[in-house]
Amino acid sequence: MATTTSTGSLVLVTAVFLASAVEMVEALTIVLAVGVTRGWKSAFEGVAVALVALAGLVLLFGPALVHYVPLSVLRLVVGGLLLVFGLQWLRKAILRAAGLKAKHDEDAIFAQQVAELSVAAPTSGRDATAFAVAFKGVFLEGLEVVVIVITLGTTSHRLGLAAIAAGAAALVVLIVGLVVHRQLSGVPENAMKMGVGLMLVSFGTFWAAEGVHVTWPGTDLAIPALVAFYGLVAWVLVAALRHDTAEEPAGLAASGEALHD
Amino acid sequence: MTEDQSAGQQPPQVRSDDNPSLVFGWIRAFGRFWWDFLIGDTPELFVGAVAVIGVLAVLSSKPGLRTIAAFVAPVLVAGVLTASVYRAARRRTS
């Protein structure tokens, strides 16, 4: 019993940490662009207010869901949400790994943000533009993390653990970003997104099925088994798509998609 | 600019209409957030996930099939993912 609980906790912490790290890398790119072009004071203020707002959302909705929604309903709805959300992440990661979708390019996004922010000269005192851009960058990227923390945390009754994992990821990315003082373009974002997608789909399948009273052999141990199964499916799909596109090279040209997608 | 506005006549009911439109705007924005979040450009994933849960609900309504449903679930989800990935691949290569 203790083994299944610790396995579930480990998968939960890994999923939340990776998802949070991926989103925070994207937010860090925006914050660094703001800091470099407009100054750090307003950028940090925007980041701080956004983090407080995100933490407030978790505190507001997390305990309310746990206390007022029956567990089977919560698992069905949250499982369904995670399943759809995870399938979206996994689909994008597979298409990127197969070369059918443009990869997230932090260098290009950083250059674009710097060019946009350099147009208007920084004003003296509080820089409203810097504050707003930093706030929006962190808040919007963080919303996905909040949804993951609340859904994974509430259904497993480990909201505190999920929140700590997300906070730790944000802190690690922030410290690394400040130390190297540049956007983290070397981070293997697609591999991380693939991992998060696999875990979200696995948790989604597990809880949505539990919500409709499916009996899982091995209870929580079914989650790593699901991760392994979906990992195998993703690997086969990437290999098959690469094989198909190698036979039809013209298909690779169709990758002009939005960088932020 | 209309004649009424140019004459500086701003009826009070115009201001009172602002609140419902503001609320309506918030509701629309909230709805759009969830639409983009759940459906976006991949409606087949949403429909597929709902269909999978429906099949599992039907299977698990019979107690003898509840464990079998656990093995059916990942296969159905993998089918939805494969269909969506190949749909995207076809759109990009055509």
Image: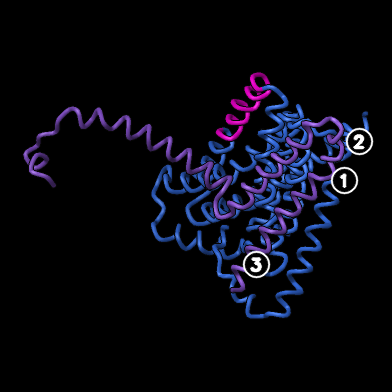
Chain letter of the residue beneath label 1 in the structure image:
A
What residue is shown at x 74% (from left), y 32% (from top)?
Answer: A212
- Residue B34 location (% of width, % of height): 53, 41
Which stretch is magenta? A53-69
Mark 2: amino acid: Gly
Mark closer to the chain start, 1 or 2: 2
User: In which quadrant will I find the C terminus of chain A?
Assistant: bottom right
Chain letter for blue?
A: A
Image quarter of residue B15: top left
Residue under label 1: A225
Residue on which disc 3 sits: B89
Residue A57 part of the magenta-drawn span: yes
Residue of label 2: A218
Pointer 1 with pointer 2, Cβ within 8 A: yes
- What is the secondary structure assignment of the residue under circle 1? helix
What amino acid type is highlighted by mark number 1? Ala
Question: Does A194 sit above or below residue B32?
Answer: below
Q: Amino acid at mark 3?
A: Ala
- Judging from the image, mark 3 belongs to the subunit labelled B
Q: How many labels sit on residues?
A: 3
| Secondary structure category for the residue under label 2 | loop
Q: Where residue A230 sits: x, y (%)?
A: 80, 52
Chain B drawn colour: purple
- As measured in the structure, the alpha-carbon distance from the residue carrying label 1 to the one carrying label 2 is 10 Å
Asked if residue A153 can be seen in this view, the reply is yes
User: Tag 3, which secondary structure?
Assistant: helix
Identified at 68% across, 23% down, the residue is: A66
Toward which corner of the image does residue A163 lie, by quadrant? Answer: top right
**Spot occupied by residue A245 in the image (x, y as percentages of width and height):** 70, 75
Query: On what subunit does the disc labeled 2 rest?
Result: A
